[in-house]
Image (cartoon, grey):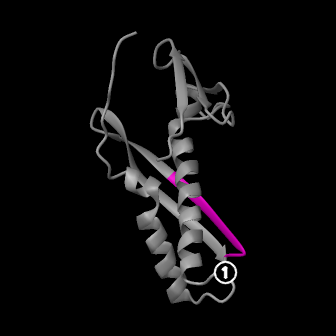
Amino acid sequence: MVQKHASAVWSGGLKDGTGRISTESGVLNETPYGFNTRFEGQKGTNPEELIGAAHAGCFTMALSKVLGEAGLTAEKLETKATVTLDKVGEDFAITKIHLVLRATIPGADEAKFLEAANAAKAGCPVSKLFKAEITLDAALA
């Protein structure tokens, strides 16, 4: 079992508050996020951007695995994920993630490539997350 850790700290209200996100690896180290980085294009990150990066990375690695199982090795796989956050009723929800893949794979034909890409999309652990039950263990400090 692999476990990775990340943390978020928030101070203030929704629109005037500020947050910082950190990861165990240190790649994100108190990186700012907030309403302004999520909805107003200010410098910093936001949950949708991080989900997009995670999904693009996971999908691309999964595709590399599927291709290897088919006896193929990619010269280059480039994936862009677009995460759509929509207002749904009174709340917001991630309603779509669109993956755009451009690949250079010597020896691959179109049918084999599309089969591998669809298998990777379905098999990527992050893709599966969007269908997962979400549980919570919460306590006040």
Residue at x 32%, y 53% (from the top left corner) = 131
Which span is picked out in magenta?
Answer: 74-82
Percent across and percent down for residue 26 are 68, 33
Relative depth, front residue between 115 and 70: 70
Look at mark 1 in the image and give the residue it sits on.
Answer: 105
Residue at x 46%, y 53% (from the top left corner) = 126
Q: Secondary structure at mark 1?
A: loop
Residue at x 72%, y 75% (from the top left corner) = 75
Q: Main secondary structure of the magenta part?
A: strand
Q: Residue furthest right?
A: 75
Percent across and percent down for residue 133 are 28, 45
**In the drawing, does residue 26 fall left or right of residue 135?**
right
Relative depth, front residue between 57 and 81: 57
Residue 101, by quadrant, is bottom right
**Figure check: 98 above or below 34:** below
Image quadrant holding the C terminus, namely top left
Percent across and percent down for residue 88 are 31, 41
**In the drawing, does residue 35 fall left or right of residue 137?**
right
Residue 79, by quadrant, is bottom right
Residue at x 66%, y 65% (from the top left corner) = 78
**Label 1, residues with CA under 10 Å away: few <14, some 14-19, many ≥20:** some
Relative depth, front residue between 109 and 125: 125
Q: Residue furthest front?
A: 1
Percent across and percent down for residue 93 are 36, 41
**Figure check: 83 above or below 27:** below
Q: How many marks?
A: 1
Type of amino acid at the residue the image marks with label 1: Ile
Is 44 part of what is drawn in magenta?
no
